[in-house]
Amino acid sequence: MGGVTVVGQPNDGGERLGATGPAGGEDLRHSGGPWLRAAGGADRLVTHLAPVRSELEAAHRGLVAGAGALAALAELSAVRASWERRIEEARGECGSLAGKLREVVRGQAHVNEAVKSGFDGVRTPGGGGAW
């Protein structure tokens, strides 16, 4: 029996590339599952952070109404602006990360196919090839 087998792993988006021959062989396993789960986690962080800015604004509004004309309000506004920037940066980074993680899965699938195609043309002794 020679050649390469590609076997999917259900529910994990995985692929197995294995060269088998008379001496046996090693398998190269790749699974998109962990990458896709991490991308989903990053997406959930984007969603989770979405309402934080409006919640911060509502809390600030209530504080300003109760504080009157305190001098600390200017400092409080600067702190709020800083947090708003940080929240938006975190959302942007998580969104970017999710896309990059999914791109790894797509790239690895292309590499796996290229490797499989490369092995498809290789003939092995005793495997019905040209040897």
Image: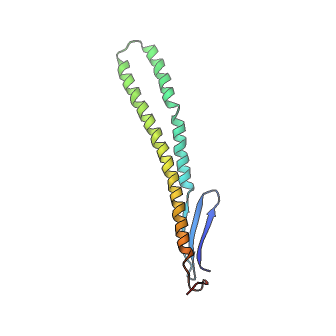
Give the residue furthest to the right.
Answer: 10
Image location of residue 35, percent across then percent down: 53, 53
Quadrant of residue 7 in the image? bottom right
- Residue 116, can we see it? yes
- In this picture the colour scheme is rainbow
Location of residue 85 (image quadrant): top left
Vertical order, 17 against 52 (above or below):
below
Task: Tell me what residue is drawn at x 51 percent, y 44 percent.
Answer: 42
Seen in the image, is 83 located left or right of residue 45? Answer: left
Number of marks drawn: 0
Is residue 105 placed above or below 129 in the rendered structure?
Answer: above
Q: Is residue 111 above or below residue 103?
A: below
Q: Quadrant of the C terminus?
A: bottom right
Give coordinates of residue 115: x percent, y percent.
52, 69
Q: Is residue 32 above or below residue 122?
A: above
Tell me the quarter of the picture where residue 86 sits: top left
* Residue at 54% over, 43% down: 43
Residue 27 visible, this orientation: no
* Residue beneath the point at 48% across and 26% down: 56
Q: Assign the N terminus to one quadrant of the image.
A: bottom right
Q: Give residue 39's position: percent from left, percent from top.
A: 53, 48
**Residue 124: x, y in percent?**
56, 82
Q: Find the residue positioned furthest to the bottom.
A: 131
